[in-house]
Amino acid sequence: MKKIKAISVSVLTAFAFSYPFLSQAEEMQGMNMGDMHGNKSSHVETFPFGHPGKSNEVTRVIKITALDFKYEPSSISVKSGETIKFIITNKGKVDHEFVLGTITEQKEHDKEMLDHPHMKMDDPNGVSIPKGKSESLIWTFTKPMTIQYACHIPGHYAAGMFGNMQIK
């Protein structure tokens, strides 16, 4: 009986010491962008340029085409106070993203995606668009500034897959 008890204690001790490492690796593998920023999916987040909008407040629809390593149009203009529904169609040969952010945020997001390429898109300011599909994003712009819309599939942003947006 003592032999079985000793083996059980050894196995439990080994598991207990390895658990934090297994947990951390599993956590990183299934991590999403909201988790990286310390945000929860249910939390409504605001950004320096605005916040997620509501469908009943849409004032304009802007259609954007995602091609391989570029967007059409490559620049757009919106007004502070507008709620825009973006409809993004991926006509490229690979999956893409559409993420709104300041240039600094885009650079940070790109680095995170390079470090964690299997992260799930779960940020309120972006959508994933599988090849051949369309997705939409509704956003209310609140402050005049220049931002970007970008794709952060590893290598896409560096290849120039971003557009400039002027909020007037």
Image: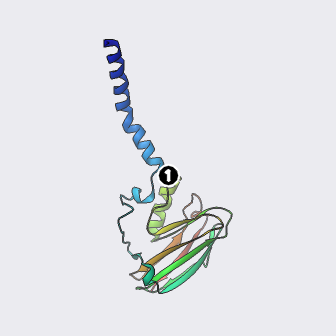
Q: Where on the picture, by quarter, is residue 2? A: top left
Residue at image coords 49%, 68%? 126
Task: Indicate the position of residue 168 as horizontal and vertical percent values.
Answer: 44, 86
| Quarter placement of the N terminus | top left
Q: Is residue 123 left or right of residue 12?
A: right
Q: Residue at x 49, y 52 (%)?
A: 115
Measured along the vertical axis of the image, is residue 122 above or below residue 164? above
Give the percent coordinates (x, y) of residue 46.
36, 72
Q: Position of residue 65 (x, y in %)?
A: 62, 74
- The one nearer the camera, 159 or 63, is 63
User: Where is 167 relative to 17, above or below?
Assistant: below
Judging depth in this view, the residue of 159 and 85 nearest the camera is 85
Residue name at image x 42 percent, y 80 percent: 141
From the viewer's perspective, tell me whether residue 54 is left or right of residue 155.
Answer: left
Mark 1 burial class by Cα count in 10 Å: few <14, some 14-19, many 20+: few
Q: Find residue 21 and report its horizontal and vertical position in percent.
A: 40, 38
Q: Is residue 110 left or right of residue 34?
A: right
Residue 110 versus residue 22: which sits nearer the camera?
22
Numbered disc 1: secondary structure: helix
| Residue with the mark numbered 1 | 115
Which residue sits at x=52%, y=54%?
A: 114
